[in-house]
Image: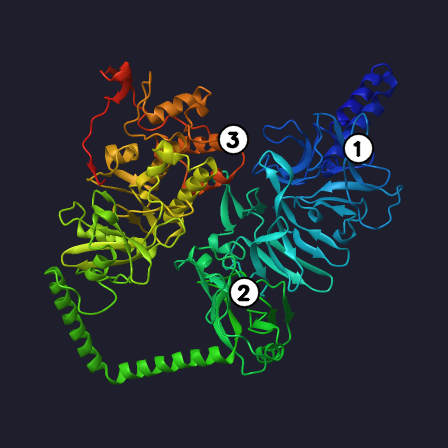
Amino acid sequence: MPQNRPTTMATIINSSTKHRSWEPFISSLILCSHMFILINPATSLDTITPTMPIDDGQTIISTNSNFELGFFSPINSPNRYLGIWYKKISPGTLVWVANRDRPIPNKNNATLKINSDGKLVVVAKQKQSFFWASKNSSKSVNTDQNLIAQLLDSGNFVLRFSNNDDPDEYLWQSFDYPTDTLLPGMKIGWDLKTGLNRALCSWRAIDDPSMGNYSYAVDIHGVPQLGIWKAGQFSYRAGSWNGLRFTGSPQLNENPVFEYTFVYNQNEAYYTTWARNNSVVTRFVLNNSGIARRLTWNDRNKEWVVYSSSPRDQCDSFGLCGAHGICSTDSSPMCRCLEGFVPKAVSDWNAMDWSNGCVRRSKMRCGEGEGFRLYPSVKLPDTRNSWVSLTMGMKECEEMCLRNCSCSGHASANARDGSGCLLWFGDLIDMRRLVDNGQDLYIKMPASELVRHSHRKKRLILIVAGVLVLSAMVLMCLVLYICKKRRQKKEEKKGETPRSGRTYAIEEDSKEELELPLFGFDVISNATDNFSEANKLGEGGFGPVFKGKLGEGKEIAVKRLSRNTAQKLSEFESEAELIAKLQHRNLVKLLGYCIERDERMLVYEFMSNKSLDLFIFDQARGLQLDWQKRVQIIVGIARGLLYLHQDSRLRIVHRDLKASNILLDDEMKPKISDFGLARCFGGDEIEANTTTVVGTYGYMSPEYTTDGLFSIKSDVFSFGVLVLEIITGKKNRGFYYQDCHLNLLGHVWRLWTGGSPLELIDESIVLNSSSPSEVLRCMHVGLLCVQHSAEDRPSMSSVVVMLSNETTNFPSPQHPGFFTERVMYETESSGNQEYCTAIDMTMTLLESR
């Protein structure tokens, strides 16, 4: 090593001062030593030998200083590991770790050397205990032969004979044992002769390089395919190779940065990439969250830039739509059954739980006229139950599938020229529609479905032919239709009932009609016993709500809009249109509507336990809600909001989330109701502004109340207030407490920061041994949601994760919004009790409830 050479020369020089007769020889020796260093820099910098190990604190560097190898400690960790990192462009960015599952406990306590068995080992200096050893090839090693371990400019650390640099003759190489990073030239996949499986494995955490939960690997069951695994199951499937790319990776196109290929033969099955231009630095990393990213180095900004990422969206989640279901981010809901298939569990499917998948509508009868239906541009299904031939043509492929009763579909194996045959057997799983670079999939169908499909095609042909031949007549019919609609709307404005039809356009320029049942006034009047007081469930700002029963015995709840209410026709339209399109187990279901005799009414499913406020703010009824039911209600509301904010077709802000708008069914499961004030965001919209602030004081966020600015974070604030109310059993608005100077949010914050948050739990809640930690977790989440700054509040997706996480390792909450001081007034009530009244804020609000 270069560190040892100065010591050696100094010794020679010191000895020369005692023997002046040796000066000419010493001068020549020093000159030769300098020449040796200049001629052989690589030998002294990038290699170790059996006689020249490296200790903790020393490193070796590849020839062109691309990579460096040595011992390191992760951030905030005392443990030491042997690793490789970038030297020039991104110092400290690790690409490989040796002893990832057996850390070295102390610094300066380990050595990397070549032992007498011809293996690379990391050992403790004193006790000589092993922390890591290389798994060499089966080639016999003569200990008398010269061995070296060399760090190459590719980032590969190799063990070889000093006189043989043939890669096929390496005794061991780090590229065969990757950690979380794929470098150009590395292989991911199998050596089928030796059984070696090269796979990426994520770090457990950003400060812990031990093996994490996710791996990026090639599966060789059936037709080989690439993907991300968690706990032995696919979490994301890139798919099988089709000659151009993996079938589930449409983004993998020809590019100027890197090339890629997949090799599959009797000896190997692996994926590899290499750089097109050595001046472009790229790496592929699997992080501890299960996200795989292709990164390139931006030398101008000195940072890594994400080139591509997998999975890309929710449709990339493996098997999201179950067997024979297909996913599309352009549809709502995103999962649909293939044509000729129906949901296996209809109730679960309607609740957006698609895991059970779909089953055939008509039973397959082998040998009785089956055929195929084409699905163009799709991600091909999971190929673990498949078979492939690269020489067979598509006609032969189709015939083979028809002859085999277990065959469920086929596709071309080579998208480059449409050749080859890929057959599936059993269920078809993990499909999605692709805009670009998808493949044609042919699904086997029974004769009855083909006939049905054929009839539809014939009808379509007849319709098109009729349009072409009778275009003038169709145009005339269209004019008559428009005139009829205009006349119908004029009649409606006069209070008349539409003469026919099951759909109704609410305003003149509406582009989309409500596809809802239209109830007549008489039907609803009979169902509610002419809106009798006995059937009245309650009354909000927009009108009363009545219980009713239809002729077939189905119970309903009817919201009757007051004729002089503040709710406008547009708000009625908003509520009807929104709820009609929303389908989730934690949202109230709209069954229909009525517009007749100047009446505007909405017909909902009936919720037997009415609203949440009747329970949490009443001590007697509160006993019916034990802690487990309250947690169930909190999680249910969170999931309903998550659907509104993220999973529905449009991003929806409720704007009036409160306890009275949470309805409870007969199992005390919550459903969000009352969408009269809801607003939709489309595209990339994340917030909006209004000049008219509407809602309920006590639940509205600071930025909405003061500036009219609302977003999904406004709903998050309301949810946080609701969580704290469910836990404490106290209303945020009008809260009072003996000897206090704070509102409810401030009082909870004071107890939280004072270390005694459990003091404010509702007295009716009985806790078991495990409940306090759940209460603290929910309270922590509630305080995070009511933080003053909208940017500090978590999203509902994060809230759902936190509520389902058994730990409480969450961010520390900041001061809540409306952290108002209160002054105390003495009143002449019995007991001379002191009440807290807020006086520090004055504002005018238009309240809807």
In the rendered image, which residue does mark 1 sit on? 52
608 left or right, relative to 311: left
**Camera-side mark, 1 or 2:** 2
Residue 477, quarter of picture? bottom left
x, y percent for residue 255: 51, 56
- Which residue, as the protein is rendered here, is positioned at the far bottom? 469
Does residue 484 appear left or right of residue 742 in this picture? left
Task: Kindly indicate the quadrant of the structure image that contains residue 352.
Answer: bottom left
Left/right of residue 627 with respect to residue 384 in the rendered view: left
| Lower position in the chain sequence, tag 1 or tag 2 | 1
Residue 714 visible here? no
Identify the residue under disc 3: 773
Of helix, strand and loop, which one carries label 2?
Answer: loop
530 or 376: nearer the viewer: 530
Quadrant holding the C terminus = top left
| Residue labelled with disc 2 | 380
Q: Residue furthest left?
A: 494
Q: Position of residue 833 (x, y in %)?
A: 29, 16
Residue drawn at x 68%, y 33% is 81
Q: Is residue 36 above or below residue 187?
A: above
Q: Earlier in the sequence, mark 2 or mark 3?
A: 2
Q: Secondary structure at mark 1?
A: loop
User: For the residues marked 1 and 3, what is the alpha-carbon distance in whole angstroms?
Assistant: 55 Å
Above or below for 71 versus 656: above
- Expressed as whole percent of the image width and height from the top left, the position of residue 326 reads 48, 63
Residue 594 in the figure: left or right of residue 85 = left
What type is the residue that disc 3 sits on?
A: Ser
Residue 397, can we see it? yes
Q: Quadrant of residue 135?
A: top right
Colour style of the rendered protein structure: rainbow
| Amino acid, disc 1 | Met
